[in-house]
Amino acid sequence: MCESVDDVTQAVLAKNDGLAASLRDELARRGVSAVNLLSSPGSGKTELLGRVLARAVERRVPVAALTADLATENDARRLARSGAPVKQLLTDGLCHLEARQLRGHVESWLPQDTSLLFVENVGNLVCPAAYDLGESLRIVLMAVTEGEDKPLKYPTAFGSAHLVVLTKTDLAEAAGFDESAFHANVRRINPGVEVVRTCARTGDGVDTVLERVLAARDGASVHRPPLAPHPHGHVHAPDPVS
């Protein structure tokens, strides 16, 4: 009997879930808190992460970053300016990161004293949302230029976020961004999740993002999203939002 596409997908995700659970245990033993950053291309994720890394380095936080792309090492070069250890992870065409890829770099590259690891996922809000990477915290970022209905269009990503970060807020007026509608849409998908407003250009919100991440690393209570990865497996897609 031929397997259906759904059966194959479930098998792939189940295998990833097992590796993610093992990686999460390994990171916990090493005292490392991993942060999975998800966004569309062009959200300003790399620029903001560079600012957060630089601030962490200033505060002597043992931080490192892995950045994923289909090709080029451009983002790794940009992030390295922060002074933090940075590694480029090339996916060779894969539109998302998987736990096996992350585990290989954790084992072969991650500095031993690291307590905070940022993982900049491939720019995509579809595939990456389904893959648990063994992270302690999942942050979904969105620029004001993307439109206030983005959470409704990508409910799995926003519904699995422990924290939502709004970027490029200095462009909100020019973009005609309806922030109150955006917050209402976020609440509809992920009730109770905090939204942090940021602007990498001015530095607004950078400290807040770092404080939230450090608090989670140090054991503070973290928001429980409705689509958090199940103990036995991956996040499940919600019913379509009409």
Image (cartoon, rainbow, N blue to C red):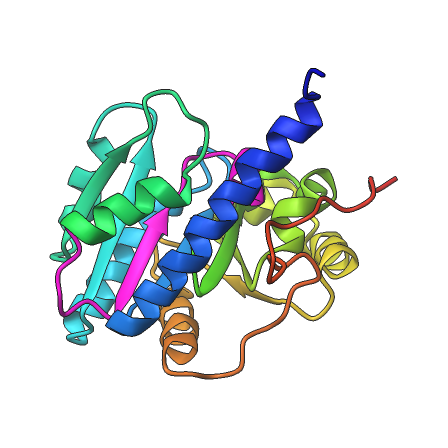
Residue 12 sits inside the magenta stretch: no
Residue 121 sits inside the magenta stretch: yes
The residue located at (32%, 37%) in the rendering is 68
The residue located at (34%, 61%) in the rendering is 203
- In the image, 173 versus 37, the foreground residue is 37
Point out the stretch of residues depicted in magenta: 109-132
Q: Could one spot residue 126 in this view of the protein? A: no
- In the image, 184 versus 155, the foreground residue is 155
Q: Residue furthest front?
A: 1
The residue located at (36%, 57%) in the rendering is 23
Q: Could one spot residue 210 in this view of the protein? A: yes
Q: Is residue 36 above or below residue 87?
A: below
Q: Main secondary structure of the magenta part?
A: loop
Q: Is residue 86 above or below residue 40?
A: below
Residue 177 falls in which quadrant of the image? Answer: top right
**Image quadrant in which the N terminus is located:** top right
Q: Position of residue 236 (x, y in %)?
A: 69, 47
- In the image, 180 versus 189, the foreground residue is 189
Left/right of residue 165 with respect to residue 6 in the rendered view: left
**Image quadrant in which the C terminus is located:** top right
- In the image, 105 versus 52, the foreground residue is 105
Q: Residue furthest right?
A: 242
Q: Position of residue 103 (x, y in %)?
A: 30, 48
The residue located at (15%, 75%) in the rendering is 60
Q: Position of residue 101 (x, y in %)?
A: 32, 40
**What is the total number of numbered labels drawn onto the structure image?**
0
